[in-house]
Image (cartoon, grey):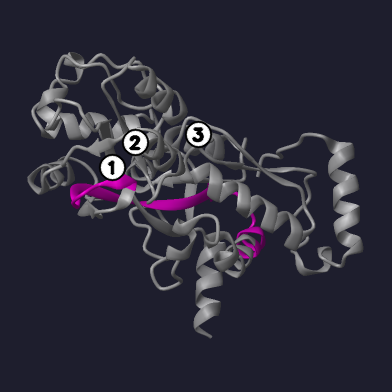
């Protein structure tokens, strides 16, 4: 595992304090660096929120210094984990499948494996409540952010538009992340934006409190077409009525979200991460509702991304 080193002096002080609280005795000896990084996402998304709480929990339980860094999203996270710039990261199942296959945004296979299947993410196509845009086909010729460069959002947005018969080139795409998309929506700079995240996504929930918004429907036939053309990672789903102020459920598609790490991560480190993740589930869920969806029976289903050997050992131990 490539070391992730920052703030050596501060990290050592932090570690010594935590060891004084007897936390260090519970972790594997393979924890050798002074700081570890979780690759999150944009600061207004579920990835970053979940990662921030997880970093706090693991720092306390393991006597280490772990931080969550803001990133462009799934593709960026996978690249960071694969290169050793982050220990763990969040990634959509479709982007992770591309990463291990060396397909899509990845020129060659990345040496990454799964730690757990965490929860399902939902595709959001957000427009103003009073907008004349009623269908995905109405996005042609409009200013619509399809997600930041190197994000899983960008991957899915292109696939949805293609399935709906909309030429991606016909959309004026500023490639904003979620934070910038929300600001641009409020200022009238864009007509809509794509987002893929858990329910509710904090930034969109906050936006819906400031102005009426709607979600455009994604038809089941489009989900089937995307699955047939790509990794079969998607399923039809609904964003329920009441979410973001919606008056009725909105059909969309969902994709699983994985916690991933490098193949070279020591198995004992992965076991420690999983022990901390499951122990902290209910505490994190008080602030991040998606964390409550972590289920030990479903966490192993990460195909086509292989489970890390340390994860396999951990889940087998749960059955013992």
- Residue 191: where, in percent of width, then height? 26, 21
Number of the label disc, if any, that sits on residue 42:
3
Residue at label 1? 123
Which quadrant, please, contains the N terminus? top right
Quick check: 52 left or right of 258? Answer: right
Residue shown at the point (46%, 58%) measured from the top left: 289
Indicate the secondary structure of the residue bearing disc 2.
Answer: strand
Mark 1–mark 3 Cα distance, whole angstroms, equals 16 Å
Mark 2–mark 3 Cα distance, whole angstroms, equals 11 Å
Mark 2–mark 1 Cα distance, whole angstroms, equals 6 Å
Number of the label disc, if any, that sits on residue 195:
2
The answer to whether residue 188 is above or below residue 128 is above
Q: Quadrant of residue 197?
A: top left
In this view of the protein, which residue sits in the foreground, 17 or 178?
Answer: 178
Mark 1 Cα shell of 10 Å, populated few (<14), some (14-19), many (≥20): many
Mark 2 or 3 closer to N-term?
3
Q: Which residues are magenta?
A: 244-272
Is residue 188 visible in this depiction of the protein? yes
| Magenta stretch encompasses residue 61 | no
Determine contact: label 2, label 1, CB under 8 Å. Answer: yes
In this view of the protein, which residue sits in the foreground, 268 or 211?
Answer: 211
Residue shown at the point (51%, 55%) measured from the top left: 288
Mark 3 Cα shell of 10 Å, populated few (<14), some (14-19), many (≥20): many
| Magenta stretch encompasses residue 269 | yes
The answer to whether residue 192 is above or below residue 237 is above
């Amino acid at each position: 595992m490539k070391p992730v080193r920052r703030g050596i002096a501060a990290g050592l002080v932090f570690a010594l304090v935590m060891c004084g609280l007897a936390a260090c005795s519970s972790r594997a000896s393979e924890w050798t660096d002074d700081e570890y990084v979780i690759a999150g996402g944009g600061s207004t998304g579920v990835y970053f929120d979940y990662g921030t709480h997880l970093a706090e929990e693991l720092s306390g339980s393991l006597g280490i210094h772990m931080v969550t860094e803001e990133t462009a999203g799934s593709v960026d996270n996978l690249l960071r984990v694969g290169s050793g710039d982050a220990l763990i990261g969040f990634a959509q199942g479709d982007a992770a499948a591309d990463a291990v296959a060396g397909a899509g945004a990845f020129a060659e296979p990345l040496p990454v494996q799964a730690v757990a299947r965490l929860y399902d993410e939902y595709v959001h196509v957000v427009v103003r409540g009073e907008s004349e845009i009623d269908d995905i086909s109405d996005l042609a010729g409009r200013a619509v952010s399809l997600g930041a460069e190197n994000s899983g959002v960008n991957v899915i947005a292109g696939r949805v538009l293609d399935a709906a018969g909309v030429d991606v080139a016909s959309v004026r795409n500023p490639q904003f992340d979620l934070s910038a998309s929300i600001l641009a929506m409020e200022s009238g700079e864009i007509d809509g934006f794509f987002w893929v995240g858990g329910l509710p996504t904090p930034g969109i929930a906050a936006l819906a409190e400031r102005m009426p918004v709607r979600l455009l429907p994604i038809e089941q036939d489009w989900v089937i077409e995307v699955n047939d053309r790509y990794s079969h990672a998607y399923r039809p789903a609904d964003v329920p009525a009441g979410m973001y102020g919606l008056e009725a459920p909105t059909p969309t598609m969902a994709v699983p979200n994985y916690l991933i790490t490098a193949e070279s991560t020591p198995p004992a480190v992965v076991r420690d991460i999983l022990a901390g993740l499951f122990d902290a589930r209910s505490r994190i869920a008080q602030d991040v509702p998606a964390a409550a969806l972590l289920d030990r029976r479903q966490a192993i289903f990460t195909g086509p991304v292989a489970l890390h050997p340390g994860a396999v050992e951990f889940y087998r131990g749960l059955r013992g």
